[in-house]
Image (spheres, helix red, strand yellow):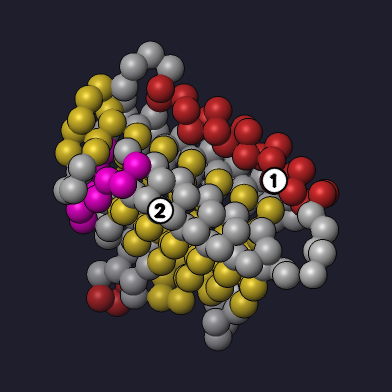
Amino acid sequence: MKPLIFAIGDKTPKIHDTAFIAPGAVVCGDVEVCENASIWYGCVLRGDENKIVVGAGANVQDGAVIHVDNPEIGGLPTLIGANALIGHKALLHGAHVHDGGFVGMGATMLDGSVVETGAMLAAGAFLSPRKVVPAGEMWAGMPAKKFRDLKDGEDKYALIGSASYIKEARRHRDALTKIS
């Protein structure tokens, strides 16, 4: 099984040669996947109405859904910065995760919401439109609000995770063998 990569009209994905797109992932439309970024099994990145960017070294983990809205109705692109970590089954819609931002498993980010560099959105959190998780803070809950200040070193979790995922993506690219 290969990843499904499609153009939608004249909107064609741009995928760097060093990026890893796992089998079963869907990448379509105006999507840019930068150097050493990884898109894992079961992810959907649909840039039909606006742009999606996955920055260098960032990882979008298994089952995540990334989408956008039409800019003609105020829709925003989804921008994932360099070395950002997007957890399993996260949902991002017209959101912005800055370089080194951390979005936990099953978290949701809606239109205009932001996770800054060195900030964390906890697993399962729901970040309402236009809310900002500032650097050095962890937000959690439904709706998400400040849970606590990050402890020493926690602001680097996305960077540590992205380095690990770059290695793991290379291992998967080299070792995958279809057996049925």
Examine the image and state in which quarter residue 92 appears. Answer: bottom left
Query: Residue furthest toward the bottom?
Result: 9
Q: Is residue 130 magenta?
A: yes
Of residues 107 and 132, the one nearer the viewer is 107
Report the disc number at residue 169: 1
Q: Residue at x 68, y 52 (%)?
A: 19
Q: Position of residue 32 (x, y in %)?
A: 57, 60
Is there any visible trace of residue 96 in the rendered image? Answer: no
Report the disc number at residue 157: none
Q: Position of residue 23 (x, y in %)?
A: 68, 64
Q: Which residue is mark 2?
A: 90
Range covered by the magenta-colored residues: 123-133
Q: Is residue 114 left or right of residue 46?
A: left
Is there any visible trace of residue 85 in the rendered image? Answer: yes
Q: Residue at x 53, y 54 (%)?
A: 62
What is the magenta segment's predominant secondary structure?
A: loop
- SS state under label 2: loop
Which of the two labelled residues, at mark 1 and mark 2, occupies the earlier sequence position? 2
Q: Is residue 136 magenta?
A: no
Which quadrant of the figure contains the N terminus?
bottom right
Residue 171 lies, with reference to residue 9, above or below; the image says above
Label 2, residues with CA under 10 Å away: few <14, some 14-19, many ≥20: many
Which quadrant of the figure contains the C terminus?
bottom right
- Give the amino acid type for the residue marked by disc 1 in the picture: Ala
Q: Position of residue 87 (x, y in %)?
A: 46, 46
